[in-house]
Amino acid sequence: MSVRNAYIVVEGPHDVELVARLLKPLGLKRVQKQPGVDPYWKRLIPTSFPPPPDLDLLRRVSVPFFFQNADVSLAIHAATGESRIAETIEESLSELRPSPGAIGVFLDADQKATPRQRFAELKARLAASKDAPVALADEPGEIAPGPPRTGAFVLPDNEQQGTLEDLLLACAATSYPSLLSAARTLVASVNPEDDAFDRQDMADFTKPAGRNKATVACITGVLRPGKAVQVSIQDNRWLEGASCELPRIKAVRAFLYALLDITGT
């Protein structure tokens, strides 16, 4: 039997849509209006702006995205960066009573650390929390039965270093092969040393995942001109058909189903 209330923390809005699309076959609908949100999550919805303690008018309101069907109520919370994942979980769990039936995490394994290192760091941080300790499983991608059920998936596959963009590019090779080829040609033609650019122009492009992110953005720019990548993940066929049968995508979906205690992939 699936858990009733599940809480998943991810690094950013692109990850939110990855999770949402992979759970779409379960009939989980996005809740857009506050009155439609399950009362269980009420204390995670801010009642004032700008948020304390810094009262920063430019800071995004930290509110989860909510999805639900007849059986499951799901909150997916974008922590706006890897450094805020544990803190976001701690803050939320201190407000939720009783604890959610499932607590999941998605994080990237960039070039600064291996998947096991990222997982071990997060596991130790969550276990050490004074207010809301969380006991993760022993390995990334595994589920601790709890209660609550817990697990962390380190993108792209719990083994290789990389990011969400590695998964999206693999999906694009299936769903949009000609567009992927054109985007890669454009990105490969960019020379960061060109006199037309200064260091600030190329600051993000020259990061380890910069070219992959640029390639995904190029594809999005064609599919949804002027829209953000997360909108394209939500609206377009990145995660449909044959793309969903890719081993890495199947692994992410299997993790989500196991976290929610749902049989079948």
Image: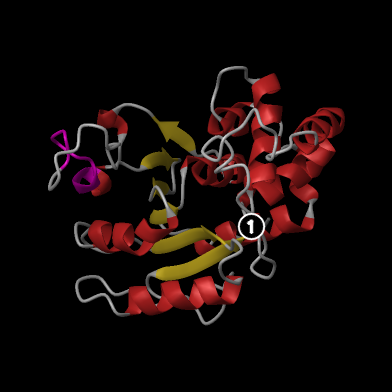
Where is residue 24 shown, x and y percent of the image? 58, 40
Rendered residue at 54%/28% (across/down): 228
Residue 260 visible in this rendered orientation of the protein: no
The residue labelled by disc 1 is 252
Left or right, 129 with respect to 145, comes to left
The magenta stretch is 42-51
Foreground: 119 or 217? 217
Residue 208 visible in this rendered orientation of the protein: yes
- Seen from this angle, which residue lies furthest front? 195
The secondary structure making up most of the magenta span is loop
- Seen from this angle, which residue lies furthest top? 225
Query: Is 46 contained in the magenta span?
Result: yes
Left or right, 21 with respect to 70, comes to right
| Count of numbered tags | 1
Query: Is 222 contained in the magenta span?
Result: no
Rendered residue at 44%/48% (across/down): 71
Where is residue 131 shown, x and y percent of the image? 19, 71
Foreground: 151 or 55? 55
Rendered residue at 13%/45% (across/down): 52
Where is residue 260 shown, x and y percent of the image? 50, 59
| Neighbour tally class for label 1: few under 14, some 14-19, many 20 plus, Cα within 10 Å | many
The secondary element bearing badge 1 is classed as helix
Q: Is residue 231 above or below residue 75?
A: above
Foreground: 175 or 115? 115
Q: Quadrant of residue 122?
A: bottom left
Left or right, 113 with respect to 195, comes to left
Where is residue 13 shown, x and y percent of the image? 47, 40
| Quadrant of image for the C terminus | bottom right
Please name the amino acid that badge 1 sits on.
Val
Q: Quadrant of residue 27?
A: top right
